Amino acid sequence: MGVYPTTKAMEFAEEQGLDLVEISPNAKPPVAKVMDYKKFLYEQKKREKVLKAKASKVVVKEIRFGPQTDDHDYEFKKRNAEKFLKDGAKLKAFVFFKGRSIVFKDQGQILLLRLATDLEEVGKVEQMPKLEGKRMTMFLSPRKTK
């Protein structure tokens, strides 16, 4: 093609039934390209849509325990947590202390650590148990499957 002055380039584009699109106006001389602009915009939107579809959305599921959760309830919630992690969601497990039950915060921590060790195969601990007000929270994320 070669380098054309603006008017010649516009005539050249018009002859071919295409558009003259300025690619980088700050360059010396400015860079322009002869193309079908509507087709270019369509392809650009299509590329963006594909990239957006490939982007993963992070889902956070929550599981709530009491400081004195019994074994049956614990096993039930552990199975749900395992299912959430296998589905690829992050897990927020927390112990909620009501009223004076805050004196059992060591039991709450033991409960969360037990959950972390039981779910070791399907999830890894992202944040160790941390007390925030009346909640002790721990985050788990799914392990990458091979």
Image: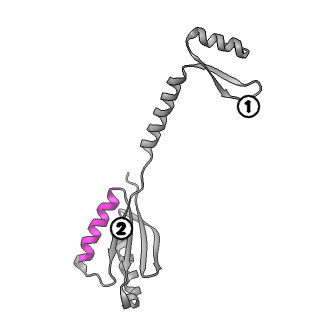
Mark 1 crowdedness (10 Å alpha carbons): few <14, some 14-19, many ≥20 = few
Residue 86's place in the image compared with 129, above or below, is above
Magenta stretch in the rendered image: 73-87
Name of the residue lying farthest toward the top: 15
Q: Quadrant for the N terminus, please.
A: top right
> How many C-alpha atoms fall within 10 Å of the one at disc 2: few (<14), some, or many (≥20)?
few
The spot of residue 125 in percent (x, y) is 43, 68
In this picture, residue 107 sits left or right of residue 70: right
Q: Which residue is found at the position 42% from the left and 78% from the top?
A: 136
In the image, residue 82 lies in the stretch drawn in magenta: yes
Along the viewing direction, whichever of 88 and 62 lies nearer the viewer:
62
Circle 2 SS class: strand
Q: Is residue 99 above or below residue 74?
A: below
Q: Earlier in the sequence, mark 2 or mark 1?
A: 1
Residue, disc 1: 26
The circle drawn on residue 145 is none
Residue 20 x, y percent position in the rendering: 62, 19
Q: Residue furthest right?
A: 28
The circle on residue 62 is 2
Q: Position of residue 89 (x, y in %)?
A: 37, 58
State the separation of the CA atoms marked 2 and 1.
Answer: 52 Å
Q: Residue at x 31, y 64 (%)?
A: 82
Instruction: Label the magenta part by its dominant secondary structure.
Output: helix
Query: Which amino acid type is marked by label 1?
Result: Asn
Q: Residue at x 25, y 79 (%)?
A: 71
The relative height of residue 133 versus residue 52 in the rendered view (above or below) is below
**What amino acid type is highlighted by mark number 2?**
Glu
Where residue 6 sits, quadrant-wise, is top right
Residue 30's quadrant in the figure? Answer: top right
Of the pair 99 and 139, the residue shown nearer to us: 99
